[in-house]
């Protein structure tokens, strides 16, 4: 396969996953500001920081407000990681690799873009925000469903899946970081009912609330929730699950091309860390520090894949 085609497929699915996860990050911020009395723009400054958008936002706005931050993350075409920008970029990549996609996958992607342009044609009212977030998640799910139901399990499939799970791992780490590093009001709230409500909000924002209850009997313990979203190999948005799939799809490419790259070693090492590590190790290191390191390693893996498979 041409590196340009592999690049288009990888980034098509990275952008779709990013759009959904930016919506989830907004949802996490909205849910947790509801638990704060007299929330301020500082809350959203933290969300922007975790999303990696703080500097770009401050270049466009003088101060952080909840309304401007949400609009910047959802609709701004000056923000390459806004939901609208991501879906436009995903569609452009899909057009570039159109002959590698089934009709159903292309149509689901194109319809996502058409619907979103209409939905985000103007600033979203606060009362409409839950419906908008649900529409984004549902449309992203339709693209994935069309893809899984119709595509051959070949290198096209593997590059697409690798893009999905690199992006998902990055965003799960960022959503966790919003809670623990940014939005907890003070150390005095750790272990309080407010702390537990905020952790429950994190679970709901990644659609993991019910699944967590099946594993932990709905006891909202911060260490258990971090363990569930980082180390549980059965949770489809956990870091462990994402890297299990990345390693699996990279191994298929290794057999296909009979070539092992630096990316394979990096992914294997990260998966071993997540398989053998304990939540005590994570908490002893510091959850924020662990997540920061993980995001850096995950970004390096993305660059190694790009270089190794000649994405140009």
Image (cartoon, rainbow, N blue to C red):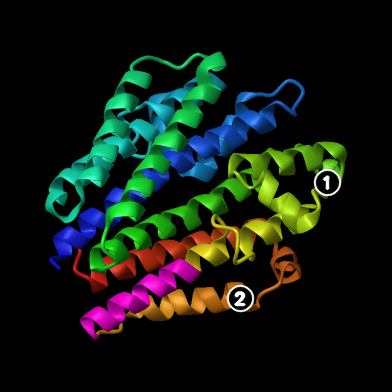
Query: Tag 2, which secondary structure?
Result: helix
- Classify residue 80 by image quadrant: top left
> Which numbered marker is on residue 275?
2
Position of residue 164 measured from the top left corner of the image (x, y, whole percent): 39, 55
Identify the residue at horizontal 29%, vertical 62% (top origin).
Answer: 157
- In the image, is 235 to the left or to the right of 54? right
- Residue 226 pos. (x, y %): 69, 57
Circle 1 is placed at which residue position?
A: 190
Front position in the image: 50 or 128:
128
Q: Quadrant of the N terminus?
A: bottom left
Q: Quadrant of residue 122?
A: top left
In-front residue for pair 151/131: 151
Residue interval drawn in magenta:
244-258
Mark 1–mark 2 CB contact (< 8 Å)? no
Residue at the farthest front position: 149
Residue 251 included in the magenta stretch of the image: yes
Which residue is at a point 73% across and 63% down the rendered structure image? 283
Depth check: 208 or 188 in front? 208
At which x and y percent is residue 121?
33, 17
Q: Estimate the spatial distance between the alpha carbons at disc 1 and disc 2, rounded to whole Å.
A: 27 Å
Q: Secondary structure at mark 1?
A: loop
* Chief SS of the magenta region: helix
Quarter the C terminus occupies: bottom left
Upstream in the sequence, badge 1 or badge 2? 1
What residue is rendered at 60% in x and 33% in y? 29
Can see residue 184? no
Image coords of residue 18 (percent x, y)? 41, 45
> Which of the numbered marks, if any, corresponds to residue 231?
none
> Seen in the image, is 194 located left or right of residue 1?
right
Question: Of circles 1 and 2, which is in front?
Answer: 2
Judge by depth and name the residue closer to the eye, 113 or 35: 113
For image coordinates 81% across by 52% down, the residue present is 217
């Amino acid at each position: 396969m041409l590196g340009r085609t592999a690049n288009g497929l990888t980034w098509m699915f990275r952008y779709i996953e990013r759009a959904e996860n930016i919506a989830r990050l907004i949802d996490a911020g909205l849910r947790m500001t509801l638990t704060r009395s007299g929330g301020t723009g500082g809350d959203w400054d933290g969300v922007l920081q975790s999303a990696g958008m703080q500097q770009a936002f401050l270049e466009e706005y003088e101060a952080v407000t909840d309304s401007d931050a949400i609009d910047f993350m959802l609709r701004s075409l000056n923000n390459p990681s806004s939901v609208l920008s991501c879906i436009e970029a995903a569609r452009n990549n899909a057009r570039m690799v159109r002959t590698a996609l089934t009709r159903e996958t292309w149509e689901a992607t194109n319809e996502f873009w058409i619907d979103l342009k209409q939905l985000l044609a103007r600033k979203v009212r606060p009362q409409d925000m839950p419906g908008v977030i649900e529409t984004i998640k549902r449309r992203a799910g339709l693209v994935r469903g069309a893809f899984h139901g119709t595509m051959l399990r070949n290198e096209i499939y593997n590059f697409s899946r690798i893009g999905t799970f690199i992006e998902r791992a990055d965003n799960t780490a960022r959503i966790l970081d919003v809670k623990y590093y940014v939005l907890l009001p003070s150390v005095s709230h750790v272990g309080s009912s407010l702390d537990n409500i905020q952790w429950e909000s994190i679970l709901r924002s990644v659609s993991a609330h019910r699944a967590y209850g099946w594993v932990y009997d709905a006891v909202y313990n911060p260490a258990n929730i971090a363990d569930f979203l980082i180390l549980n190999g059965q949770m489809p948005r956990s870091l462990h699950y994402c890297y299990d799939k990345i390693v699996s799809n990279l191994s298929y490419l290794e057999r296909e091309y009979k070539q092992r790259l630096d990316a394979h070693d990096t992914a294997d090492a990260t998966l071993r860390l997540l398989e053998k590590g304990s939540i005590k190790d994570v908490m002893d290191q510091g959850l924020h520090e662990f997540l920061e390191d993980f995001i850096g390693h995950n970004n390096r893996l993305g660059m190694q894949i790009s270089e190794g498979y000649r994405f140009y």
